[in-house]
Image (cartoon, helix red, strand yellow):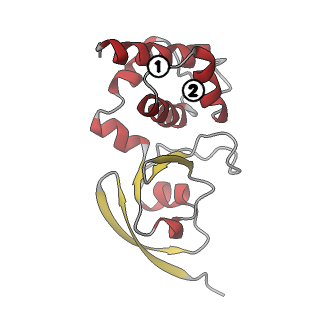
Amino acid sequence: MEDEKIQIALRVNGEQITASVEARTHLVDFLRSELELTGSHLGCEHGICGACSVRLDGVVVRGCLVLAAQCDGAEVTTIEGLTESGEISDLQERFVNRNALQCGFCTPGMLMTAAELLERKKSVPREEIREFMSGNFCRCTGYHAIIDAIEETMNDRRSGVQ
């Protein structure tokens, strides 16, 4: 028996997309396989690691827990979209300068989540940054460099330095 296909229309990184997807296709699989947007990674596939993080209607979600069919009419932004817009160029620069990316597998999810924090809050204590980022796992850096990069970006944005 063939899987049922569902017609969806959504905006991905500002571009209108119409596609036919299997009902059980996860958003991150659709983005990677159908649209070749491979910045979001498949890690645990249980919503725990954060590697598949994308924005759905302005809120960071786990792409492995959302079905593509649920995104009909939605706005999706991937790490490629944040990079192309320049929204996180200062954050990306701090990640490089602070060596906050090692193997790079978790980096897109970390950047997506950090961008959400920076959008929501202008200043928070280091512990609150750590708490906000706690849903994203990194096996390489030990997190200190990641928190340093986010904290530095937050401080620079608050003081007008970019």
Residue type, label 2: Cys
Residue drawn at (56%, 14%) of the image: 145
Disc number lying in front (2 or 1) = 1
Q: Position of residue 97 (x, y in %)?
A: 43, 12
Task: Identify the mark at residue 104; answer none if there is no mark.
Answer: none
Residue type, label 1: Ser
Residue drawn at (60%, 30%) of the image: 132
Task: Identify the mark at residue 123; answer none if there is no mark.
Answer: 1
In the visual, does 89 lie left or right of 50?
A: left
How packed mark 2 is, by other alpha carbons closer than 10 Å (few <14, some 14-19, many 20 or more), is few
Residue 117 sits above or below residue 33 on the image? above
Residue drawn at (63%, 56%) of the image: 65
Quarter of the image with the N terminus is bottom right
In the structure shown, which secondary structural element does the residue marked by tag 1 occupy? loop
Quarter of the image with the C terminus is top left
Q: Position of residue 63 (x, y in %)?
A: 56, 52
Q: Position of residue 76 (x, y in %)?
A: 42, 54
Q: In which quarter of the view is residue 109 placed?
A: top right
- Which of the pair 71/40 is nearer the observer? 71
Residue 74 sits above or below residue 134 on the image? below
Q: Position of residue 43 (x, y in %)?
A: 65, 43
Tag 1 or tag 2, which sits nearer the N-term? 2
Residue drawn at (56%, 44%) of the image: 41
- Which residue lies under the disc numbered 2? 103
